[in-house]
């Protein structure tokens, strides 16, 4: 009996110490848990960095279609002249109709003002009595050339710069125009192959 009593007392003491130990361990865990959140929530750091790039402006225009060939033909017998253009018109002559315009694109990254000139006058290019040498330009893509002088109108060419538009855009979806050509060839014109040059100039704004 005495031994059992001692055993029960010892067991109670052991349980008491075990409970105290568990409580201590739990308290330590709680402290670490609390301190961990406290440190994470209050100790922060922030910094910034910079990325830099310099893009230079580029002025460049290009005739993506740069050849118009009316081919061979003659003024009809008895007619004073023949008229042909790049819209498929042929009257008073035997030339085959064509539908080919010059196509000019702003391939740079900045808008430009645009001028146009030719290398020869109508008399130098075609000769004869009352020849005519004209061009017409229009936007191939909407608003490519704004503040234009005479869009969609046949205009006499010149060997000095003609202002086409004060703003030729450079955005990919509005940077292209078409330039058509019309000739009135007299019956007493020059013969043989006649060639001339169109020169477009883009100037940075």
Image: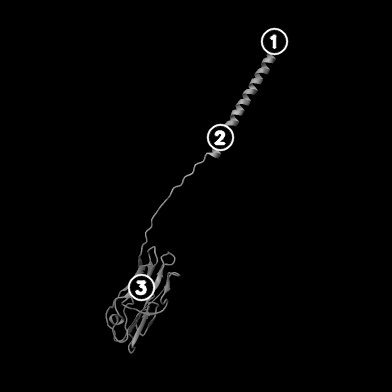
Q: CA distance from mark 2 to mark 3?
A: 73 Å
Sequence-first tag of 2 and 1? 1
**Disc 3 on helix, strand or loop?**
strand
Q: Are marks 2 and 1 in contact (CB under 8 Å)?
A: no
| Residue 138 percent across, percent down from the top left | 42, 74
- Closer to the camera, 197 or 143? 143
The answer to whether 24 appears left or right of 89 in the picture is right
- Mark 2, secondary structure of its residue: helix
Outermost residue toward the bottom in this view: 78
For label 1, count other residues whose C-alpha is less than 10 Å away and answer few (under 14), some (14-19) or many (20+): few
Can residue 39 be seen?
A: yes
For the C terminus, the quadrant is bottom left
> Nearer the observer, disc 2 or disc 3?
2
Which residue is identified by label 1?
3
> Which of the two discs, 3 and 1, labels the residue nearer the N terminus?
1
Q: Tell me, for residue 115, which label it has, or none.
A: 3
Numbered mark located on residue 36 in the image = 2
Crowd class of label 2 (few under 14; some 14 to 19; many from 20; radius 10 Å): few
Rendering quarter of residue 78: bottom left
Q: Residues within 10 Å of mark 3 (few under 14, many from 20)?
A: some
Kindly report the distance in space between the C-alpha atoms of the residues bearing marks 2 and 1. Answer: 49 Å
The quarter in which the N terminus is drawn is: top right
From mark 3 to mark 1, how far is it between C-alphas?
120 Å
Looking at marks 2 and 3 on the same chain, the residue that comes earlier in the sequence is marked by 2
Residue 66 in view here: no
Image quadrant in which you'd find residue 147: bottom left
Q: At 54% from the left edge and 36% from the top edge, which residue is drawn?
A: 39
Residues under numbered marks 2 and 3 in contact, where contact means CB atoms less than 8 Å apart: no
């Amino acid at each position: 009996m005495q031994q059992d009593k001692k055993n029960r007392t010892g067991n109670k003491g052991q349980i008491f110490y075990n409970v105290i130990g568990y409580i201590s361990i739990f308290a330590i865990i709680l402290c670490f848990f609390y301190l961990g959140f406290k440190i994470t929530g209050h100790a922060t750091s922030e910094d910034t960095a910079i990325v830099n790039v310099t893009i230079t402006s580029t002025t460049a225009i290009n005739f993506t279609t740069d050849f118009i060939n009316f081919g061979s033909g003659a003024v009809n017998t008895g007619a004073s002249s023949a008229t042909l253009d790049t819209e498929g018109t042929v009257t008073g002559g035997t030339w085959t109709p064509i539908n080919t315009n010059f196509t000019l694109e702003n391939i740079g990254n900045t808008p430009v003002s645009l001028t146009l000139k030719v290398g020869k006058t109508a008399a130098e290019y075609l000769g004869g009595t009352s020849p005519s040498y004209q061009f017409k330009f229009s936007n191939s893509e909407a608003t490519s050339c704004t503040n234009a002088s005479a869009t969609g109108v046949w205009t006499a060419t010149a060997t000095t710069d003609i202002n086409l538009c004060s703003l030729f855009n450079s955005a990919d979806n509005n940077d292209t125009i078409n330039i058509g050509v019309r000739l009135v060839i007299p019956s007493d014109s020059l013969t043989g192959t006649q060639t001339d040059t169109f020169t477009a100039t883009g100037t940075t704004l």
